[in-house]
Image: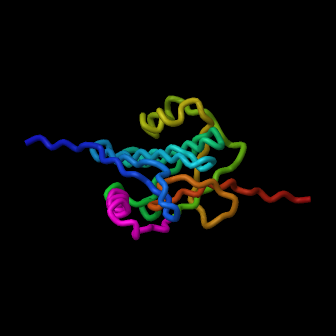
Amino acid sequence: MILCFLPKTFTLRDPISNYVTGTMTIHSEEHIVDVHVRSGVYSSDTIFDYTHGYIATKLFSRNACFIMKIEKDVIPDLEEIGRLAFERQVTLDVYSPNNVWAQFQPGTSRLGHFRDWILYGKHIENLCTGLPLYELVATEHADGCASAGIPSILGLKICEELIATEY
């Protein structure tokens, strides 16, 4: 018997207006979640690569890629994301306020090289090639952050780390 895992695509709606803001496709056989959000300055593409253990977000407003290691205590697993997406699609009452806050240091970007793409995998390579890469680190709540992730399921708040200067 041959099992076939077809990708499952979900429509993502704004929790307040109910307008479609994007799509999320779960590729169970590849352990990949592919998210496309089209919402003005909040537009982004995000890859959750559970095989390699990284999330990459391309923020169109910043023309850059932000990469974060998947921390199991912070990021839901593939099955949980699928369950939340299914519940959100079936009933409009389900809303997960889960947010992950992550910081990057401005001025520390680099372009990806061969060894980066081996570490991050081909899906993230396809998303981020030619863009500056920033490493994200999980943090507590911060202000002035860009929004990405999966609307109404798992928000990813990308924040600049403010460096104190002495006068």
Relative to 13, is 131 above or below? above
Residue 167 magenta: no
Judge from the rendering whether residue 105 lies leftward or rightward of residue 54; answer left or right: right
Where residue 84 sits, quadrant-wise, is: bottom left
Horizontal and vertical percent for residue 124? Answer: 47, 38
Q: Residue at x 87, y 59 (%)?
A: 166
Relative to 145, is 30 above or below? above
Relative to 37, is 89 above or below? below
Judge from the rendering whether residue 36 lies leftward or rightward of residue 60; answer left or right: left
Where residue 78 sits, quadrant-wise, is: bottom left
Residue 91 magenta: yes
> Magenta stretch?
80-98
Looking at the picture, the colour scheme in use is: rainbow
Q: Quadrant of the C terminus?
A: bottom right
Q: Which residue is drawn at 69% across and 63% down?
A: 143
Horizontal and vertical percent for residue 1? Answer: 7, 42
Q: Residue at x 40, y 49 (%)?
A: 24
